[in-house]
Image (cartoon, grey):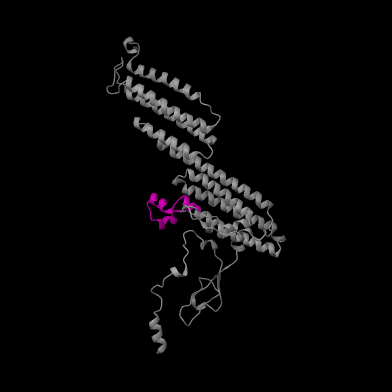
Amino acid sequence: YLRRMDVFTEAELRIKFLQARDAWLKSMLGSIIDNDPYFHITKTIEACRVHLFDIITQYRAIFSDEDPLLLSSDHTVNESAIFHGWVVQKVSEFLRTLESDLQKGVGGRLDSLLGQCMYFGLSFSRVGADFRGQLAPMFQKVAMNTFVKAVQDALEKFKEDMNLYTLTSPPAMLGSTIPVTLPTGQPGTLQPPMVLLDFPPLACFLNNILAAFNDLRLCCPIALAQEVTMCLEGALVKVTKLILTFHRAEETAFSVKERDLFVQFCITFTEDLVPYLNRCLQVLFPPAQVAQILGIPPTQLHKYGSIGCININAILEQLDFLLPKKEIIIPPQSPNQILTAETTLESPVSEIKTGKLSEQYPPSTILSSSVQSFTTEEMKPGPLFVDIQTAEDTLLQ
C-alpha cells in the first residue's frame, strides 16, 4: 500500500519498516523484569530469538535483495547492507545486555546460560549472523573472575583460621583413624587426603578451593589452563607466607610437642595438600588435551611454564628449612660392596665414605601426580641384572 502511494523510495521503506519493528522489539525487551540477572538474560534470549526471527521472516517476505534500486540522485544503494547493519546492531545490543547481566552474577548457572546463548548463536547462523565466536571470551572472563574471587575468599578464611589456630594435638588424630576409601566411581574422582583433618586450617582451605574447582568445572574453557594455574600457584605462595608468619610469631613459645606438630603441619601441606591440588588441576585440564591444542608432545608441556601444572618447587622452597631431611640410600655397585654415604649428590665418587647420604629436597617431588607407584611384583629385572648361572660358575672357580 505504501509502495502504491509512492511517498517513500524503496530504501526508505526498508528503513521505516526496520525502525517500526525495532521500536516494538525494544518495548518487548523493556518489559522484562531485571531484578534477577539470570531471569532477565534468559528471557531476553528467548524474546530476541523468537521476535527477531519473526522480523527477519517478515522483512524477507516484503523486500527482495536481488536487484539494487536507484535513488533520484542515481546513486546505487546496497539494500542488503541496510538489513545487515540492523541485524548487527541488534546482536551488539544483545551482547552488551549479556555482558551486563554476567557482571551482576548468575550464580552457578553459567553452563546453562552458555548453552542457551550457543543455541541462539547457532540459530542466527542461518541468517548469516553467527555470533558464537564472541561468546567464548565473554564467558571465559566471567569464569576466571569467579574463580579468582573464590580463591581470594579462601585465602582470607585461611588467614583468619591461622590467626586463631593453636597447635594442640587433635583427639586421637582424626586423619589417622578414619579409614581411607579409594574412589570406585567415576575415574575423574579424586579422594582428598584424610590426614588434613588433623589440621583444620588446611582442611578448610582445601574445601574452599575444591568448591571453586567444582564451580569452574561446569564451565571450564581449556584456554584458562595457564591463568587458573598461575592464580592457584600465587595463592599457595601466600599460604606459605602465612605459615611462615605463624612460625615467626609462635616459634619462641613452642614446646617440644608443639614444634613436632608444626613440622607435621608443614609436611602435610607440602606432601599432601599441594600434590593433591596439582592432580585436581590435571583432571580439570588434562595434559594430553592441552598438548594436543598446543601441537606439542605431552612430554614437552612442562617447557611452556605453568599450564595445568603447579611449579611445586617455587612454592615449597621457603619451607625447606622447616622440613626434615630425607635419606637417600645409594644401591650397592657389586655383590660384595654395600655403599652408603654421607655426602651430597654432587660429591665425586672418590670422596664417598661409609655412612648415610642425606640431602634436603622438596618431598613433594615424590608425590607428584605424574609419578606412578609400582609394587615389587610389577618391577621386572632389566638387562643390567647379573645372570644367576654366571655368578654360580664364578663362585665355583
341 to the left or right of 120:
right
Q: Residue at x 51, y 26 (%)?
A: 32
Q: Quadrant of the N terminus?
A: top left
Is 93 situated above or below 322?
above
Which secondary structure class fits the magenta region best? helix
Q: Quadrant of the C terminus?
A: bottom left
Q: Evaluate whether residue 308 shows in this view.
A: no
Residue 223 lies, in percent from the top left, at: 44, 46
- Residues 287 and 106: in front is 106
Q: Residue at x 47, y 50 (%)?
A: 284
The stretch of residues the image draws in magenta is 280-304
Furthest-top residue in view? 5
62 to the left or right of 289:
left
Q: Residue at x 41, y 35 (%)?
A: 119
Residue 380 lies, in percent from the top left, at: 41, 71
Q: Residue at x 43, y 21 (%)?
A: 22
- Residues 243 and 394: in front is 394
- Residues 168 and 239: in front is 168
Is 255 situated above or below 145?
below
Residue 8 lies, in percent from the top left, at: 35, 13
